[in-house]
Image (spheres, rainbow, N blue to C red):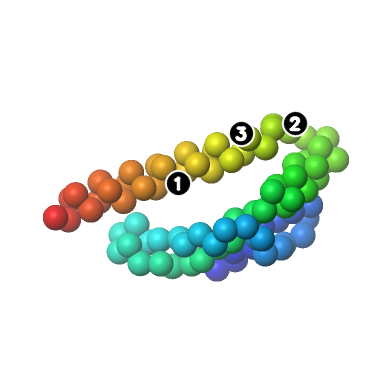
Amino acid sequence: MQTKLLINGILVKGEGTLERVLDPASGKCIAEVHEASRAQLDAAVDATADDGRRQRPIEHHVTDGDQVIRHARTILRRRARLTT
């Protein structure tokens, strides 16, 4: 499983916090991925600006990620209730 970040066309290991990726059906850890560091996020945003793409402030990207995590936790809680 590829777990590196694509920043400016190069795959790199994240330098941020280690996150565990869980299989929603079993709850078992299937991968561990390092988040991007602030410097890596800035580099990724700068790369999109160089590419002429519309960029959003970094706070929006962090918020999007937080929403994904909250959604995943909600799904896991619901599944846990169904199995008990």
User: Residue at 85% across / 40% down in the picture?
Assistant: 50
Return the mark for residue 60: 3
Q: Indicate the secondary structure of the residue bearing disc 3.
A: helix
Indicate which disc, 2 or 1, sits on the residue closer to the N terminus: 2
In the picture, measured across the screen, residue 28 lies left or right of residue 34, that is left
Rendered view: 57 above or below 72: above
Residue 59 in picture, x, y percent from top left = 63, 35
Nearer to us: label 3 or label 2: 3
Do labels 3 and 1 touch, CB within 8 Å?
Answer: no
Label 3 to label 2, Cα distance in Å? 13 Å
Indicate which disc, 3 or 2, sits on the residue closer to the N terminus: 2
- Would residue 20 be seen by someone viewing this image from the given angle? yes
Q: Quadrant of the N terminus?
A: bottom right
In the picture, measured across the screen, residue 21 lies left or right of residue 27, that is right
User: Residue at 27% across / 48% down in the picture?
Assistant: 77
User: Residue at 65% across / 54% down in the picture?
Assistant: 36
Q: Give the residue pinned by disc 2.
A: 54
Q: Amino acid at mark 2?
A: Arg
Label 2 to label 1, Cα distance in Å? 25 Å
